[in-house]
């Protein structure tokens, strides 16, 4: 299998797709066609982030939060932008302050107001706006004030349409004006100027600034008819500027524009008492000549004041507010500038521009969220784009254009985040799948390779590791007795089931003692102790593991008896010594293995055993510090050994393991009547020669003494043979254990058919006390 970074791996291969950097995304050409083949659940998972972003965007928009942010930006820009001074305009204010109220009363008498109008008329002002409601008489002189309102062409009387307050009785229609002010309901700040209230194409109500502008122009040039082209004026409509559609700030009958404020407090303000002082000063005369004058209350106690965009940035003991008469002065000054062709202030962008900005924000968010290949690159790119968007909006306000910037920026951020979230979730799922695949691969690897070998190969990150090393190890070789006969007598399915149950138990035992299963050869196991991880107690651990494996066979056979399966018997051989351990094979196919004479000796020692026995080489026994129970010892010439090898039958091991096998079977009993048998030696799993006649003189459950005229010449210890009983007929596989001087040989049964076991028990029970043959 090629590695993900293998240059020979073809692009687009399965392994490359599974192992690629999770921060890399496939190309759009390869990615999007697959989207249409997604399952409904996967499609919902793909679309859920974008749907959540759209829903959140709609919720925030409906809450008015973006509109408040836009208003905040507008107010800040208005505060930072340089504004013209009201002193440079023709607008003047006659302000009724606290001292005037103390002198004239909380309601200035009509006679005092009439004196003020006459004084202004004599000083040569062009227009007078009386920003006071004088519909009801106040004090003396009200007849004179009404006469002035009816006859003075410069005087404009106001009414309040919303509250039903009327103008001075007798005032002609063309010198009446409304002073209605409309504040933003979001925060109570006055930002807009209502130029006129219309019914169709006709003006139903004219504002005070517009009426004063008309009168002042006529007074200056009677031949000129003043007119503001409202079609060329950027009037507010639904969705303009930073206002949201349906926010209630515009209505078809109210022709409005953003109020172009001058510097607050910059309009020359003359107290009423100073205007009425006798005689008027020359400076006052010069200041008021040819001006447009507004008369109104500026005293804070009148509570005729309004919050303006500057209020958020000019905090004192109370919120900064402007009196109503100064608000009208700002409105009038803005109309004067507009009438002269100077469209000052910050103008709202049309709703269509805001719609395009919103679409651009959505598209940019989708591009940054979905189109940028790497998330590590998309995150800073998104932050940079967001910062550039804020700067662009600031530049727009600096240039005098107010757009809905909060909603496109929010759309950009939400849809970019939705793309990142979707991709992050996809990468998380892909990572989990890859981790699951890796875990499955590791689990599969563990099934075919020992866990310690698998960890050494996988955790090192080097496919060639571990390298070949000379190690001092103990080899455990186990094999089932008579398993080949069972395969012939049972179906393959039953054989596989027995083998799997056996291996499952044995593998658990081996792992319990940290052994490394190097090979599973059918019913045989090759287990390493001391490789690939070195350990100093490898011989002791191997003996303990072998004893536990033999003890586990009883539980396995108990299950087999319940399932009516044949019982199994296992022999184990142990040998310690040096081996070469590591990866062996070619670049295409390799495995972890051990090579050396120790491996071969362990296999040959195991061949000497019968079911239930553990034979260990002398080197293994000498390498154990714990006390052992030795049930027997043998010396035998083994193939591959230069000298006879001494092997020991292990029965138990003391602390720290405290494991012991049951004692060997009792000695065979002499039979009252020897049993006639035939036997054949077995070499390399094949019967040799013709059956020889013999007789069994002594018998036990697991062994017997065989007498035959040529047995002492033909049979040697550890030879395998097949013993056939004549009545009842049946065959038993056995192994020669020792020779008696009389010529008889002691044989140990390695595989006994179930139908012969009961018969053998009955023969043993009928036998006499054990005695030598």
Image (spheres, rainbow, N blue to C red):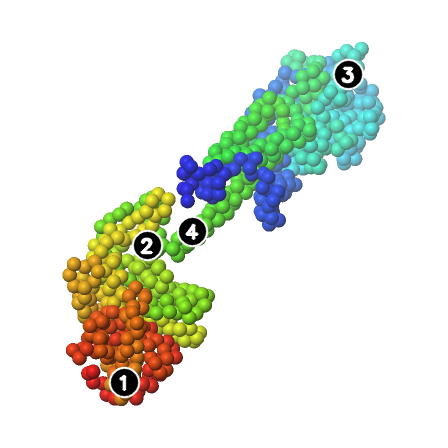
The mark that comes first in sequence, 3 or 1, is 3
Marks 1/2: CA distance? 54 Å
The mark that comes first in sequence, 4 or 3, is 3
Q: From the image, tell me which residue sits under label 3.
A: 226
Marks 4/1: CA distance? 60 Å
Residue 328 appearing in the image:
no
Disc ID at residue 441: 4
Left or right, residue 705 beside residue 380: left
Up the image or down, 343 lies above or below 389; here it is: above
The mark that comes first in sequence, 2 or 3, is 3
Left or right, residue 248 beside residue 87: right
Tell me which residue sits at (82%, 26%) in the image. Answer: 201
Q: Quadrant of residue 558?
A: bottom left
Q: Measured from the top left, where is residue 760 in percent x and y?
A: 33, 82
Q: Nearer the observer, disc 3 or disc 1? A: 1
| SS type, badge 4 | helix
Mark 3 near mark 1, Cβ–Cβ under 8 Å?
no
Tell me which residue sits at (30%, 87%) in the image. Answer: 765
Disc ID at residue 674: 1
Tell me which residue sits at (65%, 24%) in the image. Answer: 347
The mark that comes first in sequence, 4 or 1, is 4
Q: Nearer the observer, disc 1 or disc 2? A: 1
Observer-nearest of 419 and 249: 419
Left or right, residue 209 beside residue 583: right
Q: From the image, tell me which residue sits under label 2.
A: 452
| SS type, badge 1 | strand
Marks 4/3: CA distance? 89 Å
Mark 4 near mark 2, Cβ–Cβ under 8 Å?
no
Quadrant placement of the C terminus: bottom left
Marks 4/2: CA distance? 15 Å
């Amino acid at each position: 299998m090629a590695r993900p970074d293998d240059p020979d791996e073809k692009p687009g291969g399965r392994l490359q797709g599974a192992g690629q950097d999770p921060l890399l995304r496939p190309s759009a050409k390869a990615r999007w066609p697959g989207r249409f083949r997604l399952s409904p659940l996967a499609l919902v998972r793909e679309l859920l982030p974008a749907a959540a972003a759209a829903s959140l965007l709609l919720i925030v928009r409906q809450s008015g939060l973006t509109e408040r942010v836009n208003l905040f930006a507008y107010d800040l820009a208005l505060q930072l932008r340089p504004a013209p001074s009201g002193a440079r305009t023709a607008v003047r204010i006659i302000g009724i302050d606290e001292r005037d109220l103390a002198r004239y009363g909380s309601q200035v008498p009509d006679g005092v107001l009439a004196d003020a109008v006459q004084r202004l008329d004599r000083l040569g002002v062009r227009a007078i706006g009386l920003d006071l409601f004088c519909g009801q008489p106040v004090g003396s002189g009200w007849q004179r004030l009404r006469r002035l309102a009816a006859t003075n062409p410069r005087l404009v009387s106001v009414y309040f349409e919303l509250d039903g307050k009327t103008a001075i009785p007798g005032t002609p229609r063309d010198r009446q004006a409304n002073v209605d002010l409309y504040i933003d309901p979001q925060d109570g700040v006055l930002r807009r100027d209502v130029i006129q209230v219309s019914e169709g194409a006709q003006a139903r109500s004219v504002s005070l600034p517009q009426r004063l502008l008309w009168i002042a122009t006529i007074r200056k040039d009677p031949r000129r008819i003043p007119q503001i082209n409202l079609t060329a004026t950027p009037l507010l409509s639904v969705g303009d500027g930073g206002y949201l559609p349906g926010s209630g700030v515009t209505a078809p009958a109210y022709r409005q524009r953003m109020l172009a404020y001058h510097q607050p407090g910059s309009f020359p303000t003359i107290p009423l008492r100073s205007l009425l002082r006798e005689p008027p000063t020359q400076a006052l005369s010069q200041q008021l000549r040819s001006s447009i004058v507004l008369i109104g209350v500026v005293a804070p106690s009148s509570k005729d004041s309004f919050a303006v965009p500057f209020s958020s940035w000019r905090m004192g003991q109370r919120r900064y507010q402007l009196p109503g008469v100064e608000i009208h002065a700002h409105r009038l000054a803005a109309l004067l500038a507009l009438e002269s062709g100077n469209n000052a202030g910050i103008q709202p962008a049309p709703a269509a521009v805001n719609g395009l900005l919103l679409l651009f924000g959505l598209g940019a968010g989708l591009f940054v969220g979905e189109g940028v290949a790497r998330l590590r690159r998309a995150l800073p790119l998104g932050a940079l784009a967001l910062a550039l968007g804020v700067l662009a909006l600031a530049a727009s306000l600096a240039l005098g254009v107010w757009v809905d910037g909060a909603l496109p920026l929010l759309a950009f951020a939400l849809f970019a985040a939705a793309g990142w979230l979707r991709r992050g979730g996809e990468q998380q799922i892909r990572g989990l799948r890859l981790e699951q695949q890796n875990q499955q691969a590791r689990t599969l690897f563990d099934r075919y390779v020992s866990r310690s070998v698998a960890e050494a190969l996988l955790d090192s990150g080097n496919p060639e590791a571990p390298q070949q090393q000379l190690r001092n190890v103990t080899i455990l070789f186990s094999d089932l007795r008579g398993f080949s006969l069972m395969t012939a007598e049972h179906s393959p399915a039953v054989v596989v089931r027995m083998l799997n149950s056996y291996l499952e138990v044995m593998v658990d035992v081996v792992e319990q003692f940290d052994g490394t299963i190097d090979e599973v050869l059918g019913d045989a196991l090759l287990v390493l102790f001391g490789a690939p991880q070195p350990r100093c107690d490898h011989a002791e651990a191997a003996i303990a593991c072998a004893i536990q494996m033999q003890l586990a066979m009883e539980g396995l056979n108990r299950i087999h008896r319940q399932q009516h399966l044949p019982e199994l018997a296992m022999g184990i051989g142990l040998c310690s010594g040096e081996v070469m351990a590591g990866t062996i094979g070619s670049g295409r196919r390799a495995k972890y293995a051990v090579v050396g004479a120790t491996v071969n000796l362990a296999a040959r020692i195991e061949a000497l055993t019968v079911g239930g026995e553990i034979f260990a080489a002398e080197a293994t026994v000498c390498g154990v510090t714990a006390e052992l129970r030795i049930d027997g010892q043998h010396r035998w010439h083994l193939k591959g050994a230069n000298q006879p090898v001494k092997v020991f039958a292990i029965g138990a091991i003391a602390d720290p393991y405290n494991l012991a096998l049951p004692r060997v079977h009792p000695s065979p009993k002499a039979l009252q009547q020897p049993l006639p048998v035939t036997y054949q030696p077995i070499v390399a799993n094949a019967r040799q020669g013709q059956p020889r006649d013999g007789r069994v003189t002594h018998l036990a459950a697991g062994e017997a003494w065989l007498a035959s005229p040529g047995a002492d010449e033909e049979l040697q210890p550890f030879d395998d043979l097949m013993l056939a009983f004549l009545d009842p007929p049946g065959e038993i596989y056995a192994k020669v254990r020792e020779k008696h001087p009389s010529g008889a040989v002691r044989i140990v049964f390695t595989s006994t058919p179930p139908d012969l076991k009961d018969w053998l028990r009955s023969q043993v029970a009928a036998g006499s006390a054990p005695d030598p043959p």
